[in-house]
Image: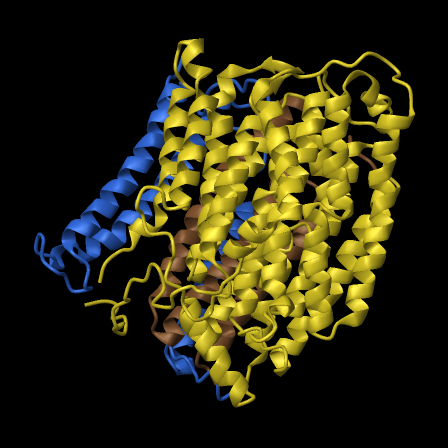
Amino acid sequence: MSQIELYHYLAVGAILFGIGLVGFMTRRNLIMMFLCTEIMFQGVALNLIAFSRFHMNPAGQSFVIFLLSIAASEAALALGLVVLLFRRRETLNADEWSEMQG
Amino acid sequence: MNSLLPSLSLAAASYNEWAVLGLLFVIAAGFAAANVVLSTSLGPKRKGLIKDEPYESGMNPVGDTKQRFNVRFYLVAMIFLVFDVEVLFLIPFITIFPQYDFLQLGAYGIKFGVLFAAVLTFMAIILVAYLYAWGKGVLKWD
Amino acid sequence: MELHVKFLVPEIILLVAACVVTLLGLARADSTRKMTQLIAALATALAFAASLGLFGNPIAVPQSTHVFFNSQYITILACAIGFLSVLSSWDMPARGEPGQTDSNYRGEFFGMMLFSLAGVAMIGKVNDLIWLFLVLELVSIPTYIMVATGRSQIIAQEAGVKYFFLGALAAAIFLFGFSYLYGFAGSTRFVDIAAAFTAASTSHTVPALALIGLLMAIIGISYKIAAVPLHFYAPDVYQGAATPVTAFLAFAPKAAGFVAIISIVSLTGFNYASSTGSVLQTLLTVMAILTMTLGNVLALLQRNIKRILAYSSIAHSGYMLVGLVAGKGTPDSPMSDGITATLFYLGGYAVMNLGAFAMLIYLQGKADAGEDLDDLAGVSKDHPAAALLFTLCLFSLIGMPATIGFLGKLYIVQSALASGHGTLAVIVVINAAIAAAYYLKIVAAMYLRDPLYPFVVRPQFPLKVAALVCTFAVIVLGIMPAPLLNVTNKAGLPSGPPAVHIDMPTPQPLVLGN
C-alpha cells in the first residue's frame, strides 16, 4: 500500500506532461510558454528514469542525459529568440505577434 | 496492479518512517508561524516615511528594481547553459575510465583507444562552439 | 566489436564542413567570409560522391530486420538536394532587400544548413530511439535559427518564434511517446522493440502503454512533415521565412520526419492485421485524408504564392501518408509496396518543389516582391525561360504525365489499390484534380496577364544552375524513373546486424550509500 511503484512515477510524469501541455495552450507570455515545454520534457525524463530503474536497463538514463542537453540547447535558443524579439517589439505577448493572417 | 508491471519498491514500506517526516514539517511550520505571530503581536509599531522605505543597508533607496539588464548577461547565460550540460557527458566516461588498460579491450568490449578518440572528438566539437563564441566577441566584457 | 563509423562518411564530411564554415564566417576579411557558400557547395558535392561510394567507403548499411528501405537512398537524396539548396541560397542571408547580402552572418547560415543536412543524411541509418531523437533535433534546431535569421524583416522573426515554440511542443509530444515505447520494450534499440511487439501481438497482450507510445510518437513527428494535426504552423512559417529557407524547410524536416515515421511504424512490422496495427492504420488513414484535403482546399483560398506552396506542401504530405497506409505490400507484387512509393514520392517532391522555389527566388529581386500572384503577372513576356521552368515544375506538382510528379502519384495510387484501399485511392485522385486549380492559377498569371511593373530578378548563376538541374531531373526521371526506383527499392540488400550497435553491459542493481 505504502510502496512507491512504477505507476506512481508514471502518474507524476503524465501529470507534469499534462500541466505543461495545458500551460502551453493557455499562457500567452513566451517565456511562460517555453517553461511549460520544459515541464513537459521533465515529465518525459521522469518516465524514462522510472522505466530504466524498472527494467534495470541503463539506456533510459543515458536517454535522459541526451534529453537534458537538448533541452538546454533549446533553452539557449529560446533565450536568444526572446531577447531578439523583445528588442524588436518591446513585448513578449504571443497575441501581439500576428503580422501574418490567412 | 497489472501483472505486466510488477511493483517497484524504492522506498520504505512503513507509515512510521513517514510520520517522522510529517512531524518535522509540523515543527518547522509551527516555529516559523510562532515567530511571525509573536513578533507582530509583542513588538512595538511605529510608522513614518523613513520607516516605510525598503531597507538598503543604510543607503538611500535609488530607482526602480525593474531595471533592464545588459544583453551581455543573457549571452553569458546562454553560453553557460549549454557548456554546463555538456560537462554531463564526460561523467559517464570518467566513471568507466579506471577500468581500462590502454589499447586493451575493456570491460564493455570497446578498445580504450576508440573510447578515448570518441571523447576527444566530443571535446573538439565543443571547442568549435567555444571558438565560435570567442570569435563572435561574447566573452569580451566592455 | 567495432564502431561502424565507416558507414557515416557522407555525414562526417557534412559535419566537419559545417564546423569549418561556421568558424570561417567569423573571419575579418570579407573575401574570406564570402567563400563560405563555396565551401558548403563543395562539401555537399563531396558528401554526394561519398554517398554513392566513390571513395571506396561502404554504402550498403547492413540492415537490421526491422528496416524496410534502403538507407543509402535518403543519404543520396539529402546530399543531392543539399547541394542544390546551397546553390539556390547563394546570396543568403539577406539584409533588407534580397541581393544585399549580410556577409556577417553567412557562416552561421550555411553552417546551420550543413548541420541540418547531416541529420537528414543520417536518419535512414538510425536504429535506436535515442539516436532517432537526436537526429530529429539535429535536423530541426538549425532550421529554427535559419528561419529567424534568414532575413531581417520582422515577419521572419515572428515565423522563427512560432516555428521554434511549436517545434519544442511537438518534440515533447513525440518524446513522451518514445518514453512509453522504451518502457514497453525495456530497450531503446529498434530490434528489441520490434521483437517485443512481435511477441506481444502473437500472444494478443499488447499493453495500452505501447499503443499510446506509438500514437504519440507519430502525432509528434507529424509536425516535421506538416501533417494534420500539427500542420497549422506551415503557412505562416513558409511565408515569413526567406524564400531559400522556405525551400529548405519543405525538404529537410519533411524527409527526416517521413523516414522517422516509417521507422516507428516498422516497429510493429507493418502488421496492420494485428489489433495494434489496425489502430495505427486507422490513425494514418485519417491523417492522410485530412492532410491532403485540408491542404488542397485551403490552398485554393490563398493569393500569396509562398502560402500556396505551403498548403501544397501539406497536401503532398497527405499523398505520401497514403503509401504508409498501404504498408510494405506483398513480396510477389512489387507495385503494392507503399513504402517504396512513399520514398519515391519524397525524392520526386523534393526535386520538383525545389525547382519551383528556385524560380520563385529568381523572380524575387526585391524584398516582398514575387510573393503575390499579381507580382508574377506576365512573367513570360520578359523572362520566358524562367516562366517555362516554373511551369514545368508546377505541372510536375500537379501530376501531369511525363513528369516525376505523375509517376509518384501513380505508384502511391497503385499501392493503395493493391492493398485494398480503393476509397483512399479515389480521394487521392480527386485531391490531385482540386490541386490542379491553384497550380494553374499561378501558370495563368504568368502567361495570360500583362506585367504590372518591370521585374527585378536575382541574376546569380548558381541559382539558375539549381533551377535547371531540378527541372531537368523532373522531366528525365519522369520518363526514365529506373535509376531512382532502383535505389529506393529495398531488393538485393544484404541483411546483417544493425550498423552501429554498442553492447550495453548487464546492469547491476544500483547501490546507494556505502
Q: Nearer the viewer, residue B75 or C40?
A: C40
Q: Nearer the viewer, residue A22 or C299?
A: C299
Which chain does the brown colour mark? A
- In percent of width and height, residue B69 lies at 52, 23
Would residue C77 be found to the left or right of residue C472 on screen?
Answer: left
Q: Residue at x 59, y 33 (%)?
A: C469
For residue C319, above or below residue C357: below
Which chain does the yellow colour mark? C
What is the tally of numbered marks visible in this picture? 0
Which chain does the blue colour mark? B
Q: Residue at x 55, y 33 (%)?
A: C84
Q: Quadrant of the C terminus of chain C?
A: bottom left
Would residue C334 be found to the left or right of residue B18 on screen?
Answer: right
Residue A26 shows in the view: no
Residue B133 shows in the view: yes
- In percent of width and height, residue C488 lies at 53, 56
Would residue C346 be found to the left or right of residue A2 on screen?
Answer: right
Q: Quadrant of the N terminus of chain C?
A: bottom left
